Image (cartoon, rainbow, N blue to C red):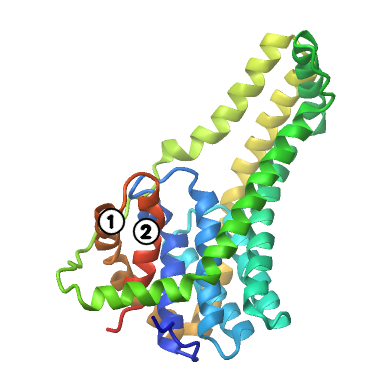
Amino acid sequence: METIKPTANLRNIDKLTALWALSESGLGGILHTFQIPFSGFFLAAFAILIIKLIAFYSKNPFQNILKATFLVLLIKAAVSPQSPPFAYLAVAFQGLSGAIIFKIIRKQAYATYLHAIFSLMETAIQKLLVLWIFLGASFFQAFDDFSKGIFKNLNMDISSFSSVIMGFYLLIYFSWAIYIGYLSNHLPENLSKRQFKFENDESIAIDKIPLKKSSYLKKIVGPLLIISGVYLLALITHSEIFLKSFYRTLIILFIWWLINPFLRKGLKRLFDKQRNNYREDFSNIFSLLSITKSKIKPAFAMARKEVKGIKVYKEFVFNLMALSLKDD
């Protein structure tokens, strides 16, 4: 099977940009629609796959990836203004790191792996950093003291259980990055085979599917779990440090609750001003969103016919990309 040729196909780059924008601005659409857990974990991986394809189709990957990143941020600000500032930071890092890596490293196979590692490790470290900001270093020290007593009763000597957990957590992300890099490098050939199959299957129905918006309840569950967990530990252990961490978390959440709307408004105002400079590109990508959105349901339906279990989601992503890149 002949692989899609890496020509400067601007139409395909636009379609990929629209698909990336849909996944970012409509997180509830692609991931929450089918109740896929750990959405952030998979969302970063999805962006890596998209950026790889943009680089594959580009004569100038640096320019095209940067432009796609900026357009995705503009659409995210327009369609999903409730997104937290950290979400914009993640998208910007994925795009900027991809543009730089694919410009410096000419061998795309190497660049793909490196970009996957950079992007996913940044995602992992960002989450750990947020925990550290909210809980403080004293919390982890108290947690180590608490777990040390438990392991002592089991005749195990683990002085820093929090470090073990974080190391294991980072190892999971690193392993996931290697796997995503592998999938990315085989993506063009994979999509070529699927497109050939779709050309001979005229029964594919393209129906629109509504995007679900994340509820207010879902947005407050995470902070409530953090607060409840810290307070529960303070009650069980009678630890003054855990209790201080509990109050620290409450104070920081309250401050974040106060400043977050202003940060979001500032970002939205900034992107609204920039949108005029990219009016034609913005309108083009925005018009592709509804077309791309209509491919979600058939992509998932075909995946459920082919495989079962967790493999359905991988097939769904590949089918969605292949359908999105089909000729109009």
The residue lying furthest to the front in this view is 1
In the image, residue 5 lies at what x, y percent?
A: 46, 88
Q: Amino acid at mark 1?
A: Glu
Q: Is residue 162 left or right of residue 50?
A: right
Q: What residue sits right under mark 1 in the picture?
A: 306
**What's the residue at 45%, 43% (across, down)?**
37
- Residue 30: which quarter of the image? bottom left
Q: What residue sits right under mark 2 in the picture?
A: 315
- Residue 286: which quarter of the image? bottom left
In the image, residue 36 lies at what x, y percent?
A: 41, 46
Q: Nearer the viewer, residue 60 or 271?
A: 60
Residue 273 seen in render? no
Classify mark 2: helix, strand or loop.
helix
**Does label 1 or label 2 sit earlier along the sequence?**
1
- Residue 327: which quarter of the image? bottom left
Which quadrant: the N terminus?
Answer: bottom left
| Circles 1, 2 touching at the beta carbon (< 8 Å) | yes
Q: Amino acid at mark 2?
A: Glu
